[in-house]
Image (cartoon, rainbow, N blue to C red):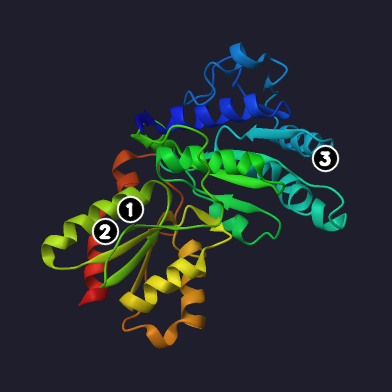
Amino acid sequence: MREITFSEATLEAMSEEMERDSRVFVMGEDIARQGGIFGQFKGLPQKFGLDRVIDTPISETAIVGAGVGAALAGARPVVDMHFADFITVAMDEVVNQMAKVRYMFGGQCSMPLVLRAPDGIIRSAAAQHSQSLEAWFMHVPGLKVVIPSNPADAKGLLKAAIRSEDPVLYFEHKALFATKGPVPDGDVIVPIGKAKVVREGTDVTVVSYSLVMNKVIKAVDSLVQKGIKAEAIDLRTISPVDKETIFKSLAKTKRLVIVHEAICTGGVGAEISAMAAEEMLDYLDAPIVRVGAPFVPVPFSPALEKLVKIESLDIEKAIESVCR
């Protein structure tokens, strides 16, 4: 077990999968020349050549469209979006092509395409470079959506995504790339669609993912001193959602808090709340609480940006309120 950064963990996953399967290649803006803006592709051009690490023009429509064609032709492309916000430019390719093609052809073809999308708030990147758009893609049948919160899951989920026969959106929070954590040696795969209980407790279930999961852990650990034993669940995958793990915990704790950096309205928390209300209402001893960003664009101003970010103290207050 080694301590490496989130960026290094994804780089390991890419290198190992490219060595394992010659059909795997990666393409996007500035990944060969710069190694990716977060260093997540550094060294791959020298190791695998420019025919498998491909710099593309600045056209998300062309990049994703080429990925769809390559996957249909038998390759296993990993497509980098530079920033998750730029998926908006390629929504037709994502929603109407890569998500639907396997269904529309009656399963005669597969779509082994991974779309890597750095997302989230970091250093005043402002409204067009700071969004968390993952909930949009929960609404699209045919897509898998994964969002790791730590280096070990980053590596294991990326390897699982590359081996998937279905398209996977791989959201990776920009603020996580430099963070360090233990990563197992060897070919460790984290299954898509399986959540993880990272803290066990009996008083309340707290569900989260991505960067904010680490703030949840901090809040949960702090509340132990106040006598609140919260159970923290890292979703890791939001489509499909691991209802079984959430509901098993909720049957024990009878209280639910869902936390994400994305806007609260129409978010992942809204979907999980609906699931719990429909199927677990008899177990609930308190209203479900969601913690998410207000319904505004992410500001450029550092002072205003702080007002839309979710911090551990916000999470503590939410947990305490539902446990009163």
What residue sits 45% from the left and 66% below the top? 245
Name the residue rendered at 45%, 30% in the picture. 7
Which amino acid is tagged 1? Ile
The mark nearer the N terminus, 3 or 1, is 3
Local SS, label 1? loop
Mark 1, other Cα within 10 Å: few <14 / some 14–19 / many ≥20:
many
**In the rendered image, which quarter is residue 151 located in?**
top left
- For label 3, the SS is helix
The secondary structure type at the circle numbered 2 is helix
Report x, y in % for residue 263. Answer: 45, 57
Looking at the rendered structure, the kind of residue marked 2 is Asp
Image location (x, y in percent) of residue 310: 33, 53
Residue marked by disc 2: 314
Percent position (x, y) of residue 65? 77, 37
Q: Which residue is drawn at the image coordinates 72% and 32% (left, top)?
A: 63
Tell me if label 1 and label 2 are in contact, CB under 8 Å: yes
Q: Residue furthest top?
A: 46
Marks 2 and 3: which is nearer the front? 3
Three-letter amino acid code of the residue under disc 3: Leu
Query: What label sits on residue 72 in the rendered view?
Result: 3
Q: What residue is shown with label 1?
A: 310
